[in-house]
Image: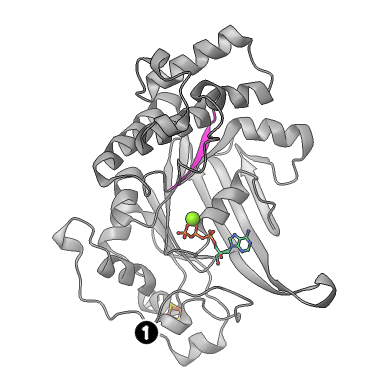
Amino acid sequence: MSEYILEVKNLKKYFPADRGLFGRVRHFVHAVDDVSFEIKYGESLGLVGESGCGKTTTGKVIVKLEEPTDGTLLLEGEDVSTYVGARKKEYHRKVQMIFQDPYESLNPRMTIFDIIAEPLNIHGIGNLKEREERVSELLQEVGLTPPSSFLWRYPHELSGGQRQRVAIARALVLNPSFVVADEPTSMLDVSIRTGIMELMMELREAHNMSYLYITHDLAVARYMCERIAVMYLGKIVEISETEELLHNPLHPYTRALLAAVPVPDPEFSRGEPEIIGSVTKPIDPPPRCRFYDRCPIRTKDCEISDHPPLVEVLPGHFVACYEVEKQKRG
Ligand SMILES: Nc1ncnc2c1ncn2[C@@H]1O[C@H](COP(=O)(O)OP(=O)(O)OP(=O)(O)O)[C@@H](O)[C@H]1O
Ligand code: SF4
Ligand SMILES: [Mg+2]
């Protein structure tokens, strides 16, 4: 058996950036560009990075809401990349996604029962009574109690936090082994975020799940995840265990993120040279390092070389940067 629940190999997703005459695509957004990582059983891997760097697209490709341009996906050691039809449907039982916006992700015309039970319906699981029992059990588990007072209500009657709990219950109804959580707390009031994060942690334990936890907030990733992958314009630039990454960030982009974002711990504030400019769209990017235009330590070599590969510079700590690699190799 594989040691990993999920293995992502050389994943790419390009979107058409515009269309020319006769609908021919001339330019592509390289939203996810040759990304590889693994997630262990029971592990939560954080995927962090600024807006537009490809986090959601990575998640959608993994749960097969988007077809990849290229790359391989293995779930529990099995190649699921080419699954279509019935096998893809089966895959959707094991892998679920929770979205950022609980206002958009729930159908306003459906009752809470119908929303949570819909996947059971799609997969033909249980009769009405069994479905009602299952949905009640889940409402209880996500803290919407007593379940009878929620079953027949509509999303608009619920608060943002309650809606997100419904979305979580829906994601769990088929007993998935792997969940992509796409910033599930970022649209919620600060006061209720911790409650949702705690719930996500408890559910992971109780149901033996693994997460890809997407967030742009390093403090959230620190709380939720054993390891963190930092993404920049479609590429993973650094990946390591959480505390190692926060105490010893090596890639200039990770260092800048940490300098800019107040992780609540004075130890982490460091006087970094600021990165230049702001994030852009990776439309037909040149082959060189994706961070080149904003990098405070770039060299002539970086300009003429391909994007650097992810290299293990310390045990379990991978970085994609020629300069860091040079320093570490002495
Ligand atoms: N369906 C699409 N068609 C065309 N371009 C897309 C599509 N979806 C995403 N993109 C582009 O791909 C890039 C990555 O987008 P993505 O939504 O994955 O980023 P993100 O890291 O999740 O950002 P955010 O933090 O804002 O949610 C962006 O440049 C975005 O404009
Ligand atoms: S490879 Fe060069 S341009 Fe890219 S991050 Fe490292 S130093 Fe900067
Ligand atoms: Mg996103």
Location of mark 1 (residue): 297
**Residue 316 in view in this figure:** no
Q: Is residue 210 left or right of residue 124?
A: left
Magenta stretch bounds:
174-182
Quadrant in the picture for the C terminus: bottom left
Front residue of 317/223: it is: 223
* Residue count near mark 1 (Cα–Cα under 10 Å), binned few <14, some 14–19, many ≥20: few
Q: Amino acid at mark 1?
A: Ile
Residue at 59%, 51% (x, y): give it.
8
Dot 1 falls on a residue whose secondary structure is: loop
Q: How is the image coloured?
A: one colour
**Does residue 300 appear left or right of residue 71 in this picture?**
left
Q: Is residue 179 one of those drawn in magenta?
A: yes
**Residue 177: in magenta span:** yes
Q: Is residue 114 above or below residue 70?
A: above
Where residue 15 appears, as percent x and y from the top left, is 66, 64
Mark 1 close to ligand 2, CB under 8 Å = yes
Instruction: Please name the residue shown 56% across and 57% down the image.
Output: 36
Q: Horizontal and vertical percent for residue 24? A: 81, 72
The residue sitting at the right extreme is 22
Query: Where's residue 315, x and y in %?
Result: 39, 58
